[in-house]
């Protein structure tokens, strides 16, 4: 969902596929410590966690995502 939104906005993004990495479990554990949530995706913009796919969708729908990306 998040990938689709960033593609729609024509914004460049980096994806780290945890299931394709040997250290994916460790990264997911650390993300849980940082964000308080272990589920993925975790979307970060300029070092700030926006949440997961549903959160990004909501930010997109109410116009806040574009404002965040423009800063």
Image (spheres, grey):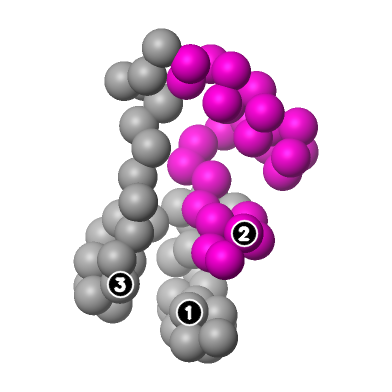
Q: Nearer the viewer, residue 58 or 21?
A: 21
Measuring from the top left, give residue 29's x and y in whole percent: 65, 23
Measuring from the top left, give residue 28's x and y in whole percent: 57, 26
Q: Are marks 1 and 3 in contact (CB under 8 Å)?
A: yes
Numbered disc in front, either 2 or 3: 2
- Say which label, 1 or 3, has the lower sequence index: 3
The span shown in magenta is 23-50
Q: Which residue is mark 3?
A: 11
User: Is disc 3 surrounded by few (<14), some (14 to 19) or many (20+) residues within 10 Å?
Assistant: few
- Say which label, 2 or 3, has the lower sequence index: 3
Compute the Cα span from label 1 to label 2.
Answer: 12 Å
Q: Which residue is mark 1?
A: 69
Give the residue at x 35% y 45%: 15
User: Is disc 2 surrounded by few (<14), some (14 to 19) or many (20+) residues within 10 Å?
Assistant: few
Residue 15 in sight in this render: yes
Q: Which residue is mark 2?
A: 47
Q: Is residue 67 above or below residue 43?
A: below
Numbered disc in front, either 1 or 2: 2
Figure quadrant of the C terminus: bottom right
Q: Is residue 68 left or right of residue 3?
A: right
Q: Secondary structure at mark 1?
A: helix
Q: Is residue 18 left or right of residue 51?
A: left
Hey, which quadrant is residue 44 in on the image? bottom right
Q: How many marks?
A: 3
Figure quadrant of the N terminus: bottom left
Q: Is residue 30 above or below residue 67?
A: above
Measuring from the top left, give residue 57's x and y in whole percent: 44, 65
Give the residue at x 34% y 59%: 13
């Amino acid at each position: 969902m998040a990938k689709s939104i960033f593609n729609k906005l024509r914004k460049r993004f980096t994806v780290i596929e945890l299931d394709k990495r040997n250290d994916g479990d460790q990264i997911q554990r650390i993300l849980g410590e940082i964000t308080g949530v272990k589920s993925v995706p975790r979307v970060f913009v300029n070092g700030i966690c926006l949440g997961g796919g549903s959160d990004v969708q909501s930010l997109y729908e109410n116009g806040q995502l574009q404002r965040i990306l423009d800063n």
